[in-house]
Image: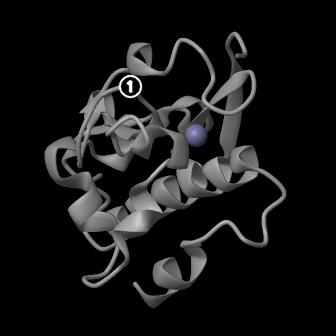
């Protein structure tokens, strides 16, 4: 899991915007879930403990924080309930299967459906979703 630790940026210093940092976090969380799946007979993490599974012990908690969500008392990211404990072979199209996304749900290990995404984009006019093939897509919503 060393690679995941390296790929998770803790600060946004070298990023051009909060949007870019957020996209990076969503992507790395999806990648972390996929790497964890590779170590667990191709079974995705359980949604109730997904954050505990995808990074090594000692990883700074900040990798799970969406800066603007933290200001609202939330972590800001969720894992799809539909993906919880699912075997990879059950998914027909990994590029269309959401794993990680911005959410208004509170707390660590937040999980739910895409309907819990912020109705107004936190930074800009989109919410970010990470898919099973580890690509990230910006879903257009209204801006501030
Ligand atoms: Zn965000």
- Specify the farthest residue to the right: 16
Q: Which residue is mark 1?
A: 104
Quarter residue 45 falls in: bottom left
Left/right placement of residue 51 relative to residue 95 reads left
| Residue 79 visible | yes
Name the foreground residue: 76 vs 109. 76
On whether ligand 1 comes within 8 Å of the CB at mark 1, the answer is no
Does residue 139 sit above or below 110 in this rendering?
A: above
- Specify the farthest residue to the left: 48
- Specify the farthest residue to the front: 71
Quarter residue 55 falls in: bottom left
The residue drawn where x is 69% and y is 35% is: 137
Q: Which quadrant of the frame does ligand 1 lie within?
A: top right
SS type, badge 1 = loop
Does residue 78 sit above or below 38 in this rendering?
A: above
Q: Residues within 10 Å of mark 1 (few under 14, many from 20)?
A: some
Q: How many marks?
A: 1
Left/right placement of residue 68 relative to residue 103 reads right
The residue drawn where x is 65% and y is 57% is: 24
Across and down, in percent, residue 2 comes to: 45, 89
Across and down, in percent, residue 31 comes to: 51, 61
Does residue 82 sit above or below 115 in this rendering?
A: below
Left/right placement of residue 7 relative to residue 102 reads right
Please state, as top left, top right, bottom left or bottom right, where the C terminus lies in the image.
top right
The residue drawn where x is 67% and y is 55% is: 21
| Residue 85 visible | no
Please state, as top left, top right, bottom left or bottom right, where the N terminus lies in the image.
bottom left
Left/right placement of residue 27 relative to residue 56 reads right
Name the foreground residue: 98 vs 125. 125
Name the foreground residue: 37 vs 65. 65
The residue drawn where x is 53% and y is 41% is: 68
Across and down, in percent, residue 117 comes to: 47, 21
């Amino acid at each position: 899991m060393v690679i995941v630790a390296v790929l998770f940026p803790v600060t946004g210093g070298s990023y051009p915007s909060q949007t870019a940092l957020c996209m990076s976090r969503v992507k790395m969380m999806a990648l972390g879930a996929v790497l964890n799946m590779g170590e667990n007979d191709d079974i995705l993490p359980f949604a109730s403990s997904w954050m505990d599974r995808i990074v090594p012990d000692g990883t700074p908690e900040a990798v799970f924080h969406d800066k603007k969500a933290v200001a609202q008392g939330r972590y800001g990211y969720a894992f799809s309930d539909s993906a919880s404990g699912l075997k990879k072979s059950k998914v027909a199209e990994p590029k269309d299967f959401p794993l990680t996304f911005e959410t208004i749900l509170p707390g660590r290990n937040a999980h739910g459906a895409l309907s819990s995404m912020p109705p107004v984009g936190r930074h800009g006019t989109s919410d970010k979703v990470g898919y099973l093939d580890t690509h990230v897509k910006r879903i257009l919503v209204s801006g501030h």
